[in-house]
Image (cartoon, grey):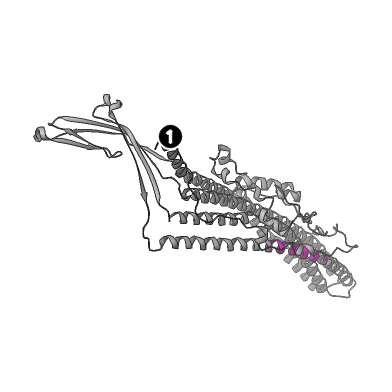
Amino acid sequence: MSPTRLRLLAAAALACLLTGCMVGPKYSPPTPATTPSAPTYKEANKTPAQPPAESPSNTSEDPTLGGLGDWSVAQPQDAMLRGKWWEIYKDPDLNALEDQLNIDNQNIKQFFENFLAARAIVRESRSQLFPTVTTGPSLTRSRGAGGAGAGGVTSTTSGNTGATTVTPSSGGASTFVSLPIDATWEPDLWGKIRNTIRQSQYSAQISAADLENERLTEQTSLATFYFEIRGQDALQQILDATVAADKKSLDLTRAQYETGTTDRLAVVQAESTLESTQSSATNLGIARAQYEHAIATLIGKSPSEFSIPVKPLLTTPPPIPIGLPSQLLQRRPDIAAAERTMAAANAQIGIAYAAYYPNVTLSAGAGFESSAFSRLLNWSSRFWSVGGSLSETIFDAGLRRATINQFVATYNADLAAYRQTVLNACQQVEDALAQLRILTQQIQQQHQAVESTRQALTLEMNRYQTGLDPYIDVVIEQNALLAAQQAMAQIEIQRSVASVQLIEALGGGWDVSQLPTPQQVTEKPSKADTTIQH
């Protein structure tokens, strides 16, 4: 055979070693057609009842009546939230808190570092594609026994090359110097290493999606606590106004008692009503303090160094674009993580299949060795070796087949988990839409209840002042009005929280295009990547 043909055959063999083939099943991501989801949201097609025409959307008489207006989803239906979703509430204080959370939240930092660790694992896996080169310089100084005579010998073995040097010894000292370089390489003939790299890349993408899911969770928790605090401030305003009204009633009752137009029982009842309302107003401070402390923890501050000014504010949540159920596949980071988990499990099956094929290891060694430093780098002191080995499992009692069955079952379990994640996401959107729709109707009804109770209190106070009814009837109506106002504020809080829950269910302003690609997670992070988290 001619030298040219030999070189061509050698080149072809080397190309086969470099490229190899991929064993195992090919991965196909789920499509909307194969994912359990409805064409539209059922709750989005139900319109809340319109508020009565004679009912004002706000009233100066009751400081607690805020967002009475109708709530509906945004149009068009295929619109999406973008970027800083909390800015739709147009609250500067909330915007500032959310921006600080994205920088200083410790849970987000933890997930970010986990993502960097996952990216490092990708590079670890990729390093297996290349040869491993090592060196082990050695220096041996030895002296033979004096009684060995001319027949005595000194033997020295190089740990890297395996070469043994035998030097005659007559009791004098000898020196041996070695400078070896060894290389080993296992060609990826069956795609085991490439599947390992893919699994690591998919795992890094899972970590990236988990980071975004944690970020969204922390952001929505902050918004929820913020609206809870504003609700507590509104409840405090209700009770403060009620305390002021009860004080006026007590002053009036005392004046009537002093003029003899009422009895001592009416005064005691008025005092009891005032004291009970004051007690309830004091108790509100517990919940507000706890929400304030929770926000401080979210933004990475000590609760002792953080406070939020009082600002009673209950308004109608802004319209939120919900899109279609099929779009959740692209908008929810937890769904993206579940899909990437399936991809990683599929790559693991390919790794298991590669165990059926032989492993080829190529090795080479070269260097210099001499009994004197001055001759170490002489051409005559060189040595080299080239070799290869092949290993194949002949009998493993079904280990490889069982391993494949294990990873196939894992993939099927991940598929079921993915579908369940999609179903849970759709449920959460439907739940939030139902809450917003029903709470909007309830607010309209509760507004009428507050107005009716206020009228009843006015009429009862007139009857008491004219001597027709005892003061206990006034107390009953006062308590009824306070309960109605508190219920109104609580429903307003629930509606604001439900709007945040809807945004969270929709994935916030995130979409799958923001998920880093396999190539991006393979690249070495820049200094900016390791210090900036958003």
**Of 297 and 215, which appears nearest the observer?**
215
Residue 152 in percent (x, y) is at: 12, 35
Residue matched to label 1: 4
**Of 534 and 405, which appears nearest the observer?**
405
Q: At 41% from the left edge and 45% from the top edge, which residue is drawn?
A: 186
Per the image, label 1 sits on a secondary structure element best described as helix
Residue 462 in percent (x, y) is at: 89, 69
On the question of residue 228 being in view, the answer is: no
- Asked if the magenta segment contains residue 77, the reply would be no
State which quadrant residue 503 falls in.
Answer: bottom right
Q: Say above or below: 268 vs 93.
A: below
- Asked if the magenta segment contains residue 441, the reply would be yes
Q: Main secondary structure of the magenta part?
A: helix
**Image quadrant occupied by the C terminus:** top right
On the question of residue 102 being in view, the answer is: yes
Q: Which span is picked out in magenta?
A: 427-444
**Image quadrant occupied by the N terminus:** top left
Q: At 84% from the left edge and 72% from the top edge, which residue is drawn?
A: 262
How many numbered circles are shown? 1
Q: At 73% from the left edge and 55% from the top edge, which residue is drawn?
A: 230
**Of 445 and 318, which appears nearest the observer?**
318
